[in-house]
Image: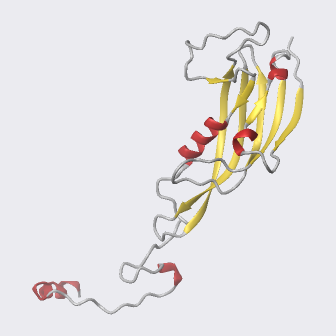
Amino acid sequence: MTREASTNTTNRTPGNQSGADALLFNVAGLLGEPLGSIRDIRVEAPPLSLGEGLVQIRDLVGDLRLTRTNRGLMVRGRLRTAIAQTCSRCLREVEWPVELDIDEEALPTIDLVSGAAVNSDDEPDALRLTNHHELDLEDDVRDLINLAEPIAPLCREDCPGLCIVCGLELASGPHDHPDEEIDPRLEGLRGLLQ
């Protein structure tokens, strides 16, 4: 018979802790509990360093549910943040909201009872707990944020873009420009336009 025990904790980040440290959870206690035991975690982490060209501009917030399984832990949850983007039409800086869905099984690298290394050759791509029985979600969260980066972000769905003559935003007001002089060789085509 399994026992469902729920423990609510918050991984609040002190001012001097990095976003990576806030995504590191000690789960040794949960691994020692019966199958089906649950731990709910509220995550509040400062922005991660995402590498060149991508900047996280909001804290990472959300909830995780860790469930003890016969092999390790089931990690499910949803995290929210925002990244800095540039509108592909008008080049305005925009804040792009990102929602990250996590649904992973985390397997141990060290047996909790014996301390012996667990063979990981069968599932080399599985999420692994650290040698200290910690769940480290930094790399997974960073990958999910990178995958959520849009190809052509827009500041709004109907963004008209930039004026091809003066380069100003078309949304900023009317853009009246004199007609361009037509190459004399193409003058005959002017009549077709009228």
Q: How is the image coloured?
A: secondary structure
Which image quarter is the N terminus in?
top right
Between 68 and 122, the residue placed more toward the observer is 122
**Residue 97 appears in which quarter of the rendering?**
bottom right
User: What residue occupies the far left of the structure in this picture?
Assistant: 185
Q: Residue at x 78, y 48 (%)?
A: 16
Q: Is residue 33 above or below residue 49?
A: above
Q: How many marks?
A: 0
Image quarter (top left, top right, bottom left or bottom right) of the C terminus: bottom left
93 horizontally vs 77: left or right: left
Q: Quadrant of residue 185?
A: bottom left
The foreground one among 139 and 145 is 139
Residue found at x 49% / y 69%: 91
Seen in the picture, residue 109 relative to 169 is either above or below; the reply is above
Up the image or down, 55 lies above or below 184; here it is above
Q: Position of residue 24 (x, y in %)?
A: 74, 34
Q: At 75% from the left edge and 18% from the top edge, which residue is drawn?
A: 69
Q: Position of residue 119 (x, y in %)?
A: 61, 10
Residue ranking furthest to the front: 16
Side (left or right) of 110 relative to 177? right
Where does residue 142 sit, x and y in percent of width and height?
60, 41
Residue 25 spot, x, y in % from top left: 77, 32
- Looking at the image, the residue that sits furthest to the bottom is 178
